[in-house]
Image (tube, helix red, strand yellow):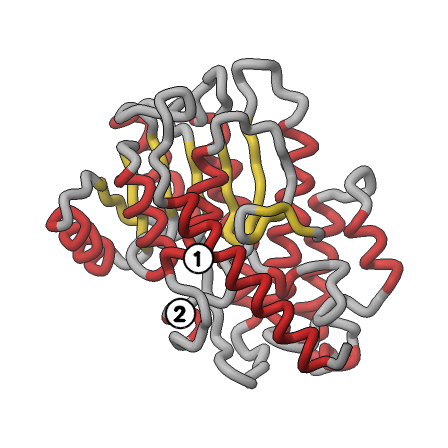
Amino acid sequence: MGKKEKSEKAKERREKRLQEIQLLRSIPYSDQQRWWSKETIAVVTGGNRGIGFEICRQLASHGLTVILTSRDASAGAESIRVLQEGGFDVVFHQLDIVDDSSINQFVEWLQENYGGLDILVNNAGVNFNLGSDNSVENAYKVIKTNYYGIKNLTEALIPLMKPSVVGARIVNTSSRLGRLNGRRNRISKVELREQLSDVEFLSEELIDRTLSSFLQQVEDGSWTSGGWPQIYTDYSVSKLAVNAYTRLMARKLSERPEGQKIYINCYCPGWVKTALTGFAGNNTVEEGADTGVWLALLHDQTVMGSFFAERREINF
């Protein structure tokens, strides 16, 4: 089978899967599946547009209390207005995930007004490359936002996650571009790839060291020969770190006793038509948000530290 035939077959399979998911989305949750209520608190970062906005809309449509956060207060307020005009009950609070004081203010506000949260969707992220561009001019900002922002907010909010029989949930928006063992765009250094693949060996120090090495090579101009992903390099490295952190935290959180479980997973929304992709994607925002919402609402949640796309687990 030639490359063209394989590509067409893959496209057919993908379209069939998206049709299946669209059908699944049209089936209401049963009373047995609905473990949540209006008192269930879901926090979504980067909720003012694109996938984050759609995640807020879908979660609100299922009857949860959704807190939409956005770095830009005016953009967040406008998003809330649009959702409220559509009949959705969503609350807004400003949050800049790369600003420690902003995180602290949000944590205090959340504790005071809601007593904590049940679901955290880490969706906020940045990308400065479009099309065939592959500049690393903004690599530091990309890493700081897409990895360290998620990490710092998650660790600030874990103490506020409410105990429950079904467990709290953390969903990290990631990307297949950050896969360790994909056929394309992976780190070429076998030893580093093996270290990052080994859950027992994995540590924050290893992730930090990997990112520091990448940023140092960006600074001295040697990154092109450093074995890093070849397309969307800084974005891919940031999402590789998110995937590794998800697996690391799953190992740590798995030690929590029953009734205090926190399930953490990540997912790829696909190439979605949003500002992040220059609206050049092939998935709608509804399709892009679906797996994140599905993971957040799973009734019989048992998986931890896994990677999903189109409601199926995929390899890191």
Q: Position of residue 17 (x, y in %)?
A: 53, 55
Tell me if residue 144 can be seen: yes
Which element type, helix, strand or loop, lies under badge 2? loop
Which element type, helix, strand or loop, lies under badge 1? helix
Tell me if residue 219 can be seen: no
Is 81 left, or right, of 111 in this rendering?
left
Residue type indicated by callout 2? Lys
The front one of 62 and 261 is 62
Residue type indicated by callout 1? Gly
Against 301, residue 99 (above or below) is below
Q: Which residue is mark 1?
A: 288
Quadrant of the image occupied by residue 286: bottom left
The front one of 248 and 299 is 299
Quadrant in which the N terminus is drawn: bottom right
Any mark on residue 273, and which? Answer: 2
The residue positioned 52% from the left and 74% from the top of the image is: 138
The residue furthest right is 191
The residue positioned 65% from the left and 58% from the top of the image is: 240
Any mark on residue 266, and which? Answer: none
Q: Position of residue 185 (x, y in %)?
A: 70, 71
The residue positioned 77% from the left and 44% from the top of the image is: 202
Against 158, residue 7 (above or below) is below
Against 202, residue 179 (above or below) is below
Q: Position of residue 55 (x, y in %)?
A: 36, 48
**Dot 2 alpha-carbon crowd within 10 angstroms: few under 14, some 14 to 19, many 20 or more:** some
The residue positioned 33% from the left and 30% from the top of the image is: 41
Quadrant of the image occupied by residue 24: top left
**Dot 1 alpha-carbon crowd within 10 angstroms: few under 14, some 14 to 19, many 20 or more:** many
Against 112, residue 101 (above or below) is below
Give the CA separation, mark 1 to mark 2: 9 Å
